[in-house]
Image: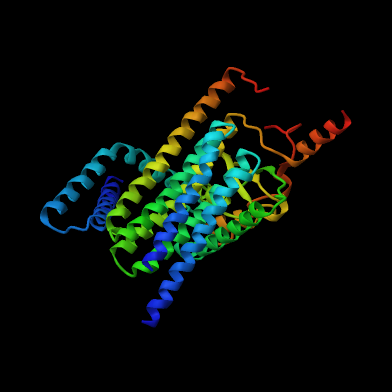
Amino acid sequence: MDLQHLLNLLTIILTAAGAFFLLVGSVGLLRLPDFYTRTHATGKADTLGIMLVITGLIINQGISVNSAKLLIIVAFVGLTNPTATNALARAAYHLRLKPWFKKDKQKKSEKKEKE
Amino acid sequence: MGNYFIYLSVVLSIIIFVPLYRVLAGPTICDRILGAGAIATKTMVLILVIGLVFNRLDMFIDITLAYAVLNFIGTIAIAKYLDILGFKKEKRGYKKK
Amino acid sequence: MKQIFFLNSITKFILLFGFWLLLSGHYDVQHISMGLFSSLFVILFNLKLRKHYFYREKLDEARAKLEDVQPYRIRIGRLLYYLPWLVWQIVVASFQVAKVVLHPKMPIDPALMRFKTGLPNTEARVILGNSITLTPGTITVQIEDDEFLVHALMDASQSGILDGSLPTEVAKLYEKKPGQVLRKEDIKISKSNKGAEV
């Protein structure tokens, strides 16, 4: 009984933390200034978020066939999410998307002030 | 515990709407695809949690696996297409202003 | 060579069949025979492609033996240390991203870094590329032969590339005592669109 409560608490903590990191990934997608910086948000925060939520579900399920399948999903997401991010960043680089730099922005604002 | 998963699924479905802005308003096509991928990632989690709510996790896990594979292959295919497009532009001496 | 390839195919077939058994919850004659048929079909369908890759890999190993270089094999023991370390790195990276994103002023200073590594084979480069994406503050943009192009979110010195710890960690997966994987003079950092060879 006591152990069951502890496991439930652990599941709640892990899934809530995962939801928080998924939210961070989404907000980063909105707030960051250009494509390359946005890939940082989805490549890292989303991977950790999905891993945390699924780990919480594994703890909830205990040792069963479902847990083995969930482990496969964790491994698959951990492998493919960074790879997809890399592929998109490479495509953007070949499409000549220019990255956003702090210095360029400062120069632009200085020019505006001079005018 | 059952109630908690219902709340979690509600929160997740609200989170899904946030990257939708990037899909609709993204300045470049790469931004849109990135947003679509982020939505797909969150949908996977939502499907799993809904499976827990309905007590049919065994069925929903299979759906999630198929969805993960589809998401990955779709993103890779679009990235490859854009890659080839970039190379062609480079060949023609395309210059961005 | 042919015998080894045959054994390799058998191993892959058993792995695929095990995966089928795990995914299908039914263990009666009909479902198991369907699994046998589909795994066999996948193996036969991919035979030509796998032959191509397999023979090329074996040729590379034979060449390495002729030139008296040790063939590179991934070390399982080291992998058991590397994976938890990588998970810890993902946690640190996500907290960093969370801090940057939720900060009202967003203290970012992006930079593009270009460097060459002396990693032994393609596999190691793939591992390094994925690891760079998952470790704090950096993502891989492009890999051309030995040359990596990396986009860094924060100040470039904070990421584990400048001191060469991450490439060394990956090289340790293959050799016990790797030489110098990355030279500091080879790293080019550009923080502006002007004058950069993009």
Foreground residue among C156 and C121: C156
Asked where in the image residue B93 lies, by quadrant, the reply is top right
Asked where in the image residue A54 lies, by quadrant, the reply is bottom left
Residue A87's place in the image compared with A82, above or below, is above
Residue A11, how many percent across, how many down? 43, 68
Question: Measuring 84% from the left and 31% from the top, which residue is drawn there?
Answer: A111
Going by the picture, which residue comes out furthest to the left?
A: C29
Foreground residue among A38 and C24: A38
Going by the picture, which residue comes out furthest to the right?
A: A114
Is residue C179 shown left or right of residue C36? Answer: right
Q: Can residue A87 be seen?
A: no
Foreground residue among A7 and B3: B3
The C terminus of chain B: image quadrant: top right
Is residue B8 shown left or right of residue B22? Answer: left
The N terminus of chain B: image quadrant: bottom left
Is residue A79 shown left or right of residue C90? Answer: left
Residue A39's place in the image compared with C75, above or below, is above
Task: Tally the numbered discs.
Answer: 0
Asked where in the image residue C48 lies, by quadrant, the reply is top left
Residue A66, how many percent across, how many down? 31, 62
Question: Measuring 72% from the left and 46% from the top, which residue is drawn there?
Answer: C109
Residue C65, how many percent across, how many down? 46, 50
Going by the picture, which residue comes out furthest to the bottom?
A: A2
Q: Can residue C165 be seen?
A: yes
